[in-house]
Image (cartoon, grey):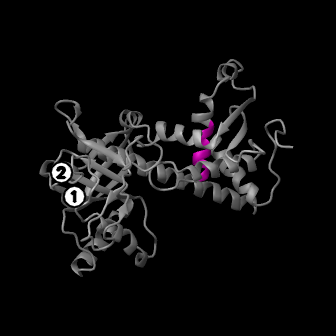
């Protein structure tokens, strides 16, 4: 693989990771707008939100009856009303392939089980598609055409909402309803007129980095390196060295996965409705790639145990992405951590 091709791959991967992050931001901000009471400056009582939740379909579901599905976002505003949301920042260029995505939305047009109520059912639920503002015209046209042709239909309220990062005095994420309606007339009108959410205020309150879609491997590696490994013992000694000293850290995939779930997902221990994210196999793949790139060594006896040679790395994400593609192009991986792997 030529240097030019590697650079293209690096840029494409950075864009994919940014898309993943923006999708998460959109779900977090949308949930906040739905649940936040501006007058009381607090979340509405008995309201809940879950980024990814396992729900059961009924026998009447026209796409997948009596099955388990996992919407990207569930927002419950009270014991009687909730919203089921699917987030898609992009769609395939070939519109013939969109049917699968909209079939996913039609799965939610059902009396789903899994709400946070005594019997896990709710009286009324709306369906929302969260998508990127640049493709809202194409999405709107597709909806108009297929609903009018009866190729697509919803018994429940359905709406499509566009999101966009905007840079004013601060970075905002805007939400604009461009198709359909919500049952809640106040929310419906508010979103029709565009809502701006300050990311610096909202995102730190929701430190979620994973949802039910596998991110790029380098994304997981960067979070492990900069957010998790730094929590291990001997870090005082590492900090005293100004991040220069190389520290040896013994890690286990299962324990790493638990740390990621507790700190960076909507995982709730003991709640079987909450999917276990990130998946253990994702973390295992990330650790195996760190081995391949000479940042870690796998234990000879225990497959899930690793030794990591940890030090501060500048531009960690970009570096990992580049080295992954260099390793795929059969270029020799630089042994930057004192030739740790011999």
Which numbered mark, 1 or 2, is in the foreground of this view?
A: 2
Residue 221: in magenta span: yes
Residue extending farthest to the bottom is 149
Q: Position of residue 156 (x, y in %)?
A: 19, 64
What is the count of numbered marks?
2
Q: Quadrant of the N terminus?
A: bottom right
Q: Quadrant of the C terminus?
A: top right
Q: Position of residue 167 (x, y in %)?
A: 40, 42
Asked if residue 286 lies left or right of residue 261, the reply is right
Tell me if label 1 and label 2 are in contact, CB under 8 Å.
Answer: yes
**Magenta part, dominant SS:** helix
Q: Which residue is mark 1?
A: 126
Residue depicted at 46% across the width and 48% down the height: 276
Q: Which mark is residue 81?
A: 2
Q: Is disc 2 surrounded by few (<14), some (14 to 19) or many (20+) residues within 10 Å?
A: some
Residue depicted at 22% across the width and 62% down the height: 111
Q: Quadrant of residue 147?
A: bottom left
Q: Which range is magenta?
A: 217-225
Asked if residue 26 lies left or right of residue 177, the reply is right
Residue extending farthest to the left is 185
Q: Is disc 1 surrounded by few (<14), some (14 to 19) or many (20+) residues within 10 Å?
A: many
């Amino acid at each position: 693989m030529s240097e030019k091709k590697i650079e293209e791959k690096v840029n494409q991967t950075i864009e994919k990771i940014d898309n993943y992050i923006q999708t998460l931001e959109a779900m977090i901000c949308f949930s906040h707008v739905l649940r936040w009471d501006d007058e009381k400056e607090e979340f509405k009582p008995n309201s809940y939100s879950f980024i990814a939740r396992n729900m059961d379909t009924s026998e009447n579901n026209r796409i997948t009856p009596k099955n388990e599905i996992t919407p990207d976002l569930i927002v419950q505003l009270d014991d009687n009303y909730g919203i089921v949301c699917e987030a898609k920042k992009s769609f395939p260029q070939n519109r013939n392939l969109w049917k699968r995505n909209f079939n996913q939305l039609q799965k939610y047009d059902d009396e789903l089980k899994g709400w946070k109520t005594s019997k896990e059912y709710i009286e009324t639920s709306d369906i929302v598609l969260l998508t990127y503002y640049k493709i809202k015209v194409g999405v709107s046209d597709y909806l108009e055409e297929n609903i009018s042709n009866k190729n697509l239909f919803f018994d429940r309220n359905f709406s499509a909402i566009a999101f966009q990062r905007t840079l004013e005095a601060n970075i905002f994420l805007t939400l604009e309803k461009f198709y359909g309606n919500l049952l809640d007339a106040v929310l419906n009108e508010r979103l029709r007129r565009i809502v701006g959410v300050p990311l610096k205020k909202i995102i730190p309150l929701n430190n979620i980095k994973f949802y039910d879609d596998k991110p790029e491997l380098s994304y997981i590696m960067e979070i492990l390196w900069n957010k998790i490994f730094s929590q291990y013992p001997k870090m005082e000694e590492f900090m005293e060295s100004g991040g220069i000293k190389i520290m040896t850290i013994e890690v286990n995939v299962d324990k790493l996965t638990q740390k990621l779930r507790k700190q960076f997902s909507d995982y709730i221990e003991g709640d079987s409705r909450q999917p276990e994210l990130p998946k253990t196999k994702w973390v295992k793949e990330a650790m195996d790639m760190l081995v391949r790139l000479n940042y870690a060594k796998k234990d000879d006896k225990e497959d899930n145990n690793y030794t990591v040679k940890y030090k501060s790395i500048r531009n960690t994400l970009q570096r990992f992405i580049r080295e992954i593609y260099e390793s795929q192009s059969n270029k020799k991986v630089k042994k930057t951590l004192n030739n740790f792997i011999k």
